[in-house]
Amino acid sequence: MKVTFLGTGTSQGVPVIGCTCEVCRSLDYRDKRLRTSAHVEVDGLSLVIDTGPDFRQQMLRENIRRIDSVIFTHAHRDHTAGLDDVRAYNFLQEMDMPVYGKPEVLEQLRTEYAYAFGKVTYPGIPRLEMREINLIRFNINGTHITPLPVKHMNLPVLGFRIKNLCYITDANFIPDETLKKMEGTDVLILNALQKEKHVSHFNIEEAIEQVERIKPRRTYFTHISHKLGLHADISKELPENISLAYDGLRVEC
Ligand SMILES: [Zn+2]
Ligand SMILES: [Zn+2]
Ligand SMILES: [Zn+2]
């Protein structure tokens, strides 16, 4: 299995428009963060988790020529705004794109992309095949995926476990029942926004506490704000088994 970090930035991305802070002015490529999304290659499947506003750019950068499914964690715009661009794959693969999400997430997508679901269609709209998931394990062409329910302030969000990889973005609470589903995690990808406390995201200290609960072999932090600090500085402060992810990073697991 191979995971590629398509984007590792929080909702505004890094640099933030108009910001002149040290991180936003940094020339280190690891301080340039598109909105959070990941590409997973497993059992010959090509999966994308979330399609944020930078989806098109991410697909071009990584030269991804096939996507078998898109899976959504939740319906915030920084995770959904690029969905229209799956059109490219509709053309290339001559098929509708399977889109997995909880009922309320699919409902929100139907509202945001109403033109793709209208009675009157026209050429060039994205062709989406909505597939409802709930909290029960599902499979895509035989590959099992376990939803990991977490909380993002009051919003229930899904993380996903694929084999021994767990991916959780946009959370500030992981219930005990979800923790059980994460037993034996080899690689954990978890959100760590900034140093200060935040209402809907783990800050870095809380994220480290979660790593201590989950006990994976290796952890990568994502969904990072410019407020966290320079990649090079923060990386030095982290425990040995935790790294900050950066855009384009590839992990084999
Ligand atoms: Zn987000
Ligand atoms: Zn900044
Ligand atoms: Zn969110």
Image (cartoon, rainbow, N blue to C red):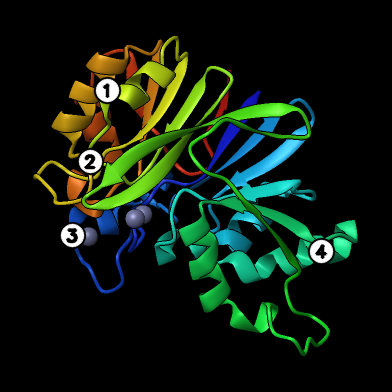
Q: Mark 4 vs mark 3: which is more N-terminal?
A: 3
Q: Which of marks 1 and 3 is nearer the N terminus?
A: 3
C-alpha distance separating marks 1 and 3: 38 Å
From mark 3 to mark 2, how far is it between C-alphas? 26 Å
Horizontal side of 203 relative to 40 (left or right) equals left
Determine whether label 1 and label 3 are within 8 Å by CB. no
Q: Distance between the residues labelled 4 and 1?
A: 40 Å
Q: Residue 21 carries which label?
A: 3
Say whether residue 101 is left or right of residue 141: left
Residue on which the image places disc 4:
90
Q: Dot 2 corresponds to which residue?
A: 172
Q: Is residue 138 above or below residue 51?
A: above
Of 148 and 11, the residue lying toward us: 148
Where residue 238 appears, as percent x and y from the top left, is 23, 22
Q: Which residue is rendered at x = 38% and y = 13% of the image?
A: 216
The residue indicated by pointer 1 is: 176
Query: In front of the other: label 3 or label 2?
Result: 2
Q: Which of marks 3 and 2 is nearer the N terminus?
A: 3
